[in-house]
Image (cartoon, rainbow, N blue to C red):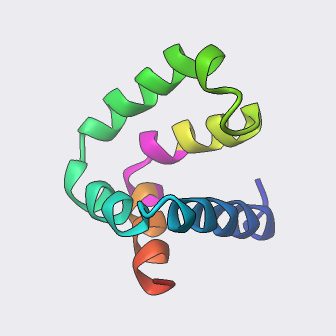
Amino acid sequence: MSVFAKQLLWQNWAERLERWGLRQLVADLLDASGPLNLLAAQAIYVGQPWLKHLMPGEHWQALTHLLEDPAEAQAFAAFLHKNT
């Protein structure tokens, strides 16, 4: 995924989280969860058939990638904190 595409995707997620009132909570969870992110990614893999109505499949794939990569998770948490 290109940097531009990732930035657009993260902005989309940030806007959704803001609408749902979860932006700060998600940023804090990403900061604190560390290895638990891998379990969350696995749960998303399993739950994709039931979650597909919330976001397109490619968004879920990008999210699982983000959760599996600690540096990526921290970068997204920083993005959420910075743009609050």
Q: Is residue 20 found inside the magenta-colored segment of the image? A: no
Q: Residue at x 46, y 83 (%)?
A: 84
Q: Is residue 80 above or below residue 73?
A: below
Who's the residue at 51% across and 48% down the image? 66
Left or right: 8 as drawn, with respect to 71:
right
Q: Position of residue 25 (x, y in %)?
A: 31, 61
- Rendered location of residue 69, percent (x, y): 44, 47
> In which quarter of the view is residue 23 placed?
bottom left
Answer left or right for 7 relative to 16: right
Vertical comparison of 6 with 82: above or below: above
Outermost residue, front direction? Answer: 20
Give the vertical position of 30 relative to 15 (above or below). above
* Relative to 30, 14 lies left or right: right
Please give the range of residues in magenta. Answer: 66-72
Task: Please say if 25 is above or below 58.
Answer: below
Residue drawn at x 43%, y 22% is: 42
Is residue 67 located in the magenta-colored stretch of the structure? yes
The chief SS type of the magenta part is: helix
Q: Residue 57: percent from the left, percent from the top?
A: 74, 31
Disc count in the image? 0
Q: State which quadrant residue 81 falls in.
A: bottom left
Q: Residue shown at 42%/22% (left/top)?
A: 43
